[in-house]
Amino acid sequence: MKIIVLAHPNDNHTAPLKWALERAGYNVVCWIGPGWQPKQQASIYFDGRVRMKLGEHTVDEGDVVWIRRPQPPVHHPNTAEADRKFAEGEYRWFNWSALYLLSELPVRCINPYDASRHINNKSVQLLMAASSGMLVPQTLMSNEPGAVREFLRPPRQQAICKAFFPHIWQKSEGGMAVTETFKLREDQLPEDDEVLTYAPAIYQDLVDKEFDVRMVLLGETVYSYSVRTPKGALDWRQDAGQGQVEVQAIATPSEVEEAVLRFARKAGISFGSLDFAVDREGRWWFLEINEEGQFLWLDEFDADAHMQEKFLAFLTLPAGASRAEIEERQFQFPSWRDYCEAIKEEGPVEEVNINVGFVSVE
């Protein structure tokens, strides 16, 4: 068995996890996606049986394929201008042919590409979460001014607005601006309806929260961590980026865990990072899931989390492994802190910058 990671080897999760897997004796290879250079070339064979080669490596029965963050396909730079759209389209369809085929091969995919693309949609997440028994705030996704104004109209007292996908603006004078969740009332909307059509957005009831929760789904097991900021920030990601969050392992209510596992089975996924807001009455409100969300940052803030080791145990165990099996095997692997110490002593692995924090940008 080998571990195939579809991501750049410099990715901020791929590098430390590859390092830890190799030190535990596993064969790990990375493939960033189709391109014209030799390491990005790929082949799919149909000759009585289906075979796939990604770069220099074949995909063999029993392999584990972690579809972490494959890069967009890259066509040859010397392609004639008149042919570029054709080449881009062919590379795009070839890429999909490879990614979707993986779930039909005798390998374990985390997560199957078709399931990951489906559940990555915010609307699908909310519907599946509610139908699985989770609490979901009232929500509107819209670019229709009348619908937005009606949603925010009293008696609704508090609402939030957030983007479908994170975005960063680079400022000409230096620095950057990043999308984040913010509170919004009807009287704060622009007078001109046209402004509300510039970009669709997600409008949602504000949960009067006591704290946030980041949950990591590992097959049939979930691990939950409370996330608290000094001033109870609406969006904790900025504080996390500045090292100002408090993270602590907490018990997951049984009804929430059962609902999450139902959700995962419906979605066809076995791994993901979920966000909840816990209100003053202790109720857990589902906010979103990123099926390939970041989790190593938990080890930065909680030395007892050991999410690196838990994830690697999950990755190398058969599908359906129990919590006890994960926690027994996790001791085979070096920790995130071991990785940081090794980088200090040996120098960067694959030119990874260990000063870049593992801040969630889902």
Image (tube, rainbow, N blue to C red):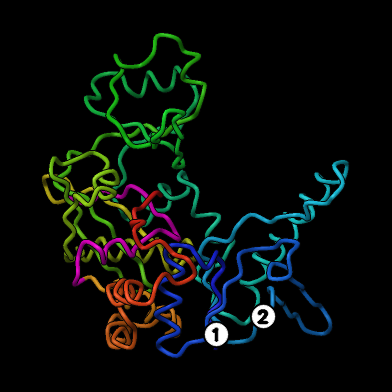
Front one among 157 and 40? 40
Residue drawn at the location 47% of the way across and 66% of the way down: 351
Q: Disc 2 vs disc 1: Cβ atoms closer than 8 Å? A: yes
The answer to which image quadrant residue 250 occupies is bottom left
Q: Which residue is mark 2?
A: 57
What amino acid is labelled 2 in the image?
His
* Mark 2: secondary structure: strand
| Relative side of 179 to 249, left or right | right
Q: Which mark is residue 207?
A: none
Would you place residue 318 above or below residue 273 in this image? Answer: below
The answer to which image quadrant residue 185 occupies is top left
Would you place residue 38 above or below residue 134 in this image? Answer: below
CA–CA distance in space, label 2 to label 1 = 10 Å
Residue drawn at the location 49% of the way across and 25% of the way down: 143
Front one among 52 and 25? 25
Give the percent coordinates (x, y) of residue 205.
Answer: 28, 34
Q: Quadrant of the N terminus?
A: bottom right
* First of labels 2, 1 by sequence position: 1
Give the percent coordinates (x, y) of residue 3.
Answer: 53, 80
| Relative side of 50 to 170, left or right | right
Magenta residues (range): 283-304
Q: Which residue is mark 1?
A: 2
Image label count: 2
